[in-house]
Image: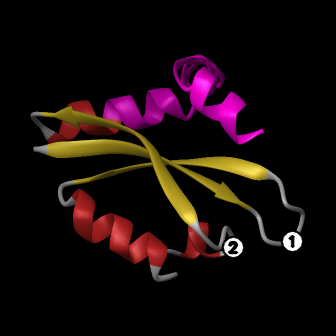
Amino acid sequence: MYYTYVLLGRDLKNKKEYFYTGMTDNLKRRLYQHKTGNVKTTKKFGNTKLVYCEICLNKTDARKRELQLKTGFGRGYLKRRLENYLKKRA
């Protein structure tokens, strides 16, 4: 199985929140890599939190979904999907 996941992180410099979208075949290992600062892209976020995850049965489908969530439509989908969670944080 493959996982398409979204992390929410806050840039340590400008305090702005960002989504990070990725794909992996081992979610637990990948989240550990993010938490320990071993991923260059999310290292600047400091603490990241898993806010969304989908499971796909093959790598191609997971990669397509990752790319879709990185588009403007995908970011809009995530904001609508996580609307209540994001409101609680504000």
At x 69%, y 73%, the residue is 44
Q: Secondary structure at mark 1?
A: loop
| Residue that mark 2 sits on | 44
**The C terminus is located in which quarter?**
top right
Quarter residue 1 falls in: top left
Determine contact: label 2, label 1, CB under 8 Å: yes
From the top left corner, tell me how far across and down residue 12 is, in percent.
Answer: 79, 71
Of residue 59 and residue 2, the one placed in the foreground of this image is 2
Residue 69 in the magenta stretch? The answer is yes
How far apart marks 2 and 1 lie (CA) works out to 8 Å
At x 51%, y 56%, the residue is 49
Label 1 Cα crowd, 10 Å radius (few <14 / some 14-19 / many 20+): few
From the top left corner, tell me how far across and down residue 28 is, in percent.
Answer: 24, 64
> Magenta segment, which residues?
64-90
| Residue that mark 1 sits on | 13
16 with respect to 32 (left or right): right
Q: Secondary structure at mark 2?
A: loop
Q: Which mark is residue 26?
A: none
Residue flagged by tag 1: what amino acid is it?
Lys
Q: Is residue 70 above or below residue 5?
A: above
User: Overall secondary structure of the magenta stretch?
Assistant: helix
At x 41%, y 37%, the residue is 66
From the top left corner, tell me how far across and down residue 68 is, in percent.
Answer: 46, 27
The first of marks 2 and 1 along the sequence is: 1
Residue flagged by tag 2: what amino acid is it?
Lys
